[in-house]
């Protein structure tokens, strides 16, 4: 027989979104009798594969403003001098070899000129560029670029340096919020949710752990299940417009000191071929499954130092996969990915070519899901029966948006005043033809 208990609020998911929501409800709003349920340890699934970056550089003004809010909240939580968790402002650098720089600047101003991410400033001289807390500086002077970023390929012609951006220790941030929530009485249980049903004015949640069944009656249920949010949504009678796309990363010890420790998170925007030895390229072309690797590859490979000044680790990522798939608890990546991403990154940072033929011994290969809606916006708000809410579809930006998303979700749950953009981040946007037309007109969803 299943054991039965009652809770005021049940949060499904102990990733960064679920922990942040528990923090906002318990610490900020003072709500009690909250239980987080997840069959795996906190921050151990997709949140464990976070890029641990943040930026307010988004093509839509709503997402830019939302990111700004989240960054401000993270800074407050980090405390003076990052006493609670590490958060640094190293910036993002978007790099290109394009020669038509006037057209490039026009595109940037068209997409990002809404002002929510700050001003766009163009520099075609070799003078020092003042530091800035917001906006972006487009560097066009080749010698100035080379002096500032000597590790980059000399063929780089322009660098767009985004200022309100950097990196954060997401595991520390999640643990900080979890500890604070636990101090306010929030519980954590290793349970797998198997069903949800309406029971009068409450929701009856069927769950299990190690073969033991449990029934939990809750006034409020929050779907923060990350890549499993679609499955949980179906338990609430709603087919959420969410797909999961697996993306991979590697982290390795940069024993040759190729990437400077103060380098920003750097993204190569240009497509181009991988530098294979001639005999390898011919072998790749002979097999239909590997032939695409011998062709031009898309842009988007990214590089950043990992772990602060005292570390020698570097992180590489490349979100080339576009195929949706059902999520699993322990996804594994392709054995070929480490060499592929290293060769892709070596186009941007030539010194990394030293690792292409002799891959680093200290290397970690891992991955997580971009759990995304078609337009790459989150879903936050009511879902299904009364008392059910969601914080889902945070794609590859869960860490940077978690605080603002949790604040918004908590406002929905507690009946607090909602910001003007709240309904655009809920399922209601799919009934607004004007909003959906705006997505189509932007031409980019900001995914990296």
Image (spheres, helix red, strand yellow):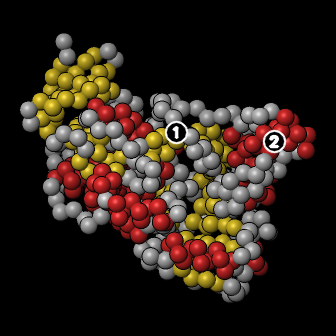
Left or right for 67, reference 213:
right
Mark 1 secondary-structure assignment? loop
**Mark 1 crowd level (few <14, some 14–19, many ≥20, 10 Å Cα):** some
Element class at badge 2 = loop
14, above or below 417, in the image: above
Image spot of residue 347 (x, y percent)? 76, 57
In the rendered image, which quarter is residue 75 located in?
bottom left
Q: Quadrant of the N terminus?
A: top left
Q: What residue do we see at 25% from left, 18% from top?
A: 213
Q: Residue at x 39, y 35 (%)?
A: 228
**Which dot, 1 or 2, sits closer to the camera?**
1
Q: Position of residue 153 (x, y in %)?
A: 77, 65
Residue drawn at x 61%, y 77% as measured from the top left: 105
Residue placed farthest to the right in the image?
279
The outermost residue toward the left is 200
Q: Is residue 420 left or right of residue 293?
A: left
Residue 342 horizontal/vertical position (percent): 73, 48
Which part of the image, by quadrant, shows the C terminus?
bottom right
Specify which label sits upstream in the sequence, 1 or 2. 1
Is the Cβ of the residue at disc 1 closer than 8 Å to that at disc 2? no
- In front: 317, or 101? 101
Q: Residue at x 42, y 65 (%)?
A: 438
The residue at which mark 1 appears reads as: 324
| Above/below status of 243 relative to 444 | above
Instruction: Report if residue 124 is visible in the image.
Output: yes
Tell me the distance, in whole angstroms, between the alpha carbons under discs 1 and 2. Answer: 33 Å
Residue situated furthest top in the rendering: 1
Toward which corner of the image does residue 143 lie, by quadrant? Answer: bottom right
Q: What residue sits right under mark 2 in the picture? A: 358
5 to 127, vertically: above or below: above
């Amino acid at each position: 027989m299943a054991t039965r208990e009652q809770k005021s609020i049940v949060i499904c998911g102990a990733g960064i979104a679920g922990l942040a929501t528990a923090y906002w409800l318990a610490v900020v709003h003072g709500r009690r009798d909250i239980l987080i349920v997840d069959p795996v340890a906190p921050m151990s699934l997709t949140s464990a594969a976070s890029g641990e970056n943040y930026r307010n550089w988004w093509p839509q003004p709503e997402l830019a403003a939302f990111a700004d809010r989240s960054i401000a909240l993270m800074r407050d939580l980090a405390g003076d001098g990052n006493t609670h968790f590490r958060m640094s402002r190293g910036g993002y650098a978007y790099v290109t070899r394009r020669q038509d720089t006037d057209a490039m600047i026009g595109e940037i101003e068209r997409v990002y000129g809404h002002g929510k991410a700050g001003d766009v400033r163009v520099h075609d001289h070799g003078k020092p560029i003042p530091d800035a807390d917001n906006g972006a500086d487009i560097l066009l002077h080749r010698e100035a670029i080379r002096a500032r970023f000597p590790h980059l390929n000399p063929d780089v012609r322009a660098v767009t340096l985004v200022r309100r951006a950097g990196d954060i220790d997401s595991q520390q941030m999640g643990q900080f919020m979890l500890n604070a929530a636990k101090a306010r009485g929030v519980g954590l249980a290793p349970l797998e949710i198997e069903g949800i049903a309406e029971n009068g004015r409450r929701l009856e949640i069927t769950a299990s752990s190690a073969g033991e069944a449990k029934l939990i009656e809750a006034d409020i249920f929050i779907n923060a299940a990350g890549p499993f949010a679609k499955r949980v949504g179906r338990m609430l009678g709603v087919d959420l417009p969410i797909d999961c796309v697996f993306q991979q990363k590697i982290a390795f010890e940069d024993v040759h000191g190729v990437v400077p420790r103060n380098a920003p998170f750097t993204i190569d925007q240009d497509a181009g071929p991988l530098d294979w030895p001639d005999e390898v390229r011919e072998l790749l072309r002979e097999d239909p499954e590997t032939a695409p690797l011998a062709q031009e590859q898309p842009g988007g490979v990214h590089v950043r130092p990992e772990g602060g000044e005292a570390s020698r680790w570097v992180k590489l990522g490349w979100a080339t996969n576009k195929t949706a798939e059902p999520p699993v608890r322990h996804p594994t990546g392709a054995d070929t990915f480490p060499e592929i991403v290293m060769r892709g990154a070596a186009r941007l940072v030539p010194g990394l070519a030293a690792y292409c033929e002799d891959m680093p011994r200290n290397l970690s290969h891992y991955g997580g899901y971009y759990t995304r809606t078609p337009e790459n916006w989150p879903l936050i708000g009511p879902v299904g029966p009364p008392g059910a809410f969601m914080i889902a579809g945070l794609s590859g930006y869960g860490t940077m948006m978690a605080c603002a998303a949790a604040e918004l979700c908590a406002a929905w749950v507690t009946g607090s005043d909602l910001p003007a953009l709240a309904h655009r981040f809920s399922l209601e946007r799919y009934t607004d033809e004007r909003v959906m037309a705006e997505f189509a007109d932007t031409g980019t969803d900001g995914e990296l």
